[in-house]
């Protein structure tokens, strides 16, 4: 089973602040994803990636940048944080081959509060 | 338009009974993949079970099973002999066959409460 870790687990910042959320997976998955979770909306896809240097735009990308530095590491950047970005953020990864292809494995989440 | 819809926002059942959670999806692809995930009270999201559209047999894992009704674009999750620890939020998700990057579309979730 995939091991996905996220840091920090909790973060408080002010409006206009600069925030970086980190995600690391250690099972050599090519696909990685960033989601936000808000009450009534389920999980919404922000950005995703297939391998180092690859970035794709998700459904709710405004106000977010992402960078995939290695196969293991995927970062979400909020350069001018706003209160509307207060949310629970999840990272996930998945394989692109084999019996578990398409199944996404999630990290523990990062709770972000923008004051 | 939402691709995955869960209309039940919350369900409450008594322990040891069977519960079904509904999910309908929308796609034009002939091949697609359906998933159910569980989010525990601690926030952890765990993969439970999947159904590939080309498979006629309903998937079963432990006390989880699926009711796949392809003509109705429906994929229900059935939990038999419910336990207190099944209390959680359950998400349905879909990957379209023509989708690149294994992108999943999630429903808004159903909160299940299992009472003694």
Image (cartoon, coloured by chain):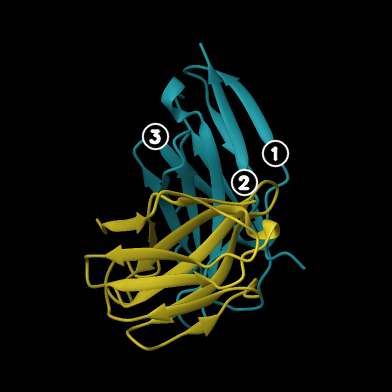
Check the rendered structure and report the hue given to chain B: cyan
Q: Position of residue B67 (x, y in %)?
A: 54, 47
- Work out how far the residue at label 2 is from the one at label 1, CA to CA, in angstroms: 7 Å
Q: Which mark is residue A5?
A: none
Residue annotated with mark 2: B109
The N terminus of chain A - image quarter: bottom left
Question: Residue B82: percent from the left, percent from the top?
Answer: 46, 24
For label 1, the residue is B9
For marks 3 and 1 on the same chain, the one whose residue lies earlier in the sequence: 1
How many angstroms separate mark 3 from mark 1 (CA)? Answer: 22 Å
Residue placed farthest to the bottom in the image? A53
Q: Which one is nearer the viewer's eye here, A53 or A65?
A: A65
Q: Distance between the residues labelled 3 and 2?
A: 20 Å
The residue under label 3 is B63
Q: Which mark lies nearer to you, 3 or 2? A: 2
Q: On the same chain: label 3 and label 1? A: yes
| Mark 1 burial class by Cα count in 10 Å: few <14, some 14-19, many 20+ | some
Residue that appears at 58% across and 31% down: B112
**Which mark sits nearer the N-terminus, 3 or 2?**
3
- Badge 3 marks a residue whose secondary structure is loop
Callout 2: chain = B
Residue at disc 1, secondary structure: loop
Does residue B96 show up?
no
Mark earlier in primary sequence (2, 1): 1
Q: Which chain carries label 3?
A: B
């Amino acid at each position: 089973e995939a091991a996905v870790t996220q840091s920090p687990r909790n973060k408080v910042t002010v409006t206009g602040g600069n925030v970086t959320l980190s995600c690391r997976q250690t099972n050599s998955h090519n696909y990685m994803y960033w989601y936000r979770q808000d009450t009534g909306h389920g999980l919404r896809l922000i950005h995703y990636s297939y391998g180092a240097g690859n970035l794709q735009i998700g459904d709710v990308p405004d106000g977010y940048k992402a960078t995939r530095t290695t196969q293991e590491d995927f970062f979400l950047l909020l350069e001018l944080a706003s209160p509307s970005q207060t949310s629970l953020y999840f990272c996930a990864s998945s394989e692109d081959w084999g019996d578990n292809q398409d199944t996404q494995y999630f990290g523990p989440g990062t709770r972000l509060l923008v004051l | 338009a939402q691709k995955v819809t869960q209309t039940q926002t919350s369900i409450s059942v008594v322990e040891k009974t069977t519960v079904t959670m509904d999910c309908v999806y929308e796609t034009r692809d002939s091949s697609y993949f359906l998933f159910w995930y569980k989010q525990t009270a601690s926030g952890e999201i765990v993969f439970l079970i999947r159904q590939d559209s080309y498979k006629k047999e309903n998937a079963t894992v432990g006390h989880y099973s699926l009711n796949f009704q392809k003509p109705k674009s429906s994929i229900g999750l059935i939990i038999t002999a419910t336990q207190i620890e099944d209390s959680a939020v359950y998400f349905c998700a879909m990957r379209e066959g023509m989708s690149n990057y294994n992108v999943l579309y999630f429903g808004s979730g159903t909160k299940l409460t299992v009472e003694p």
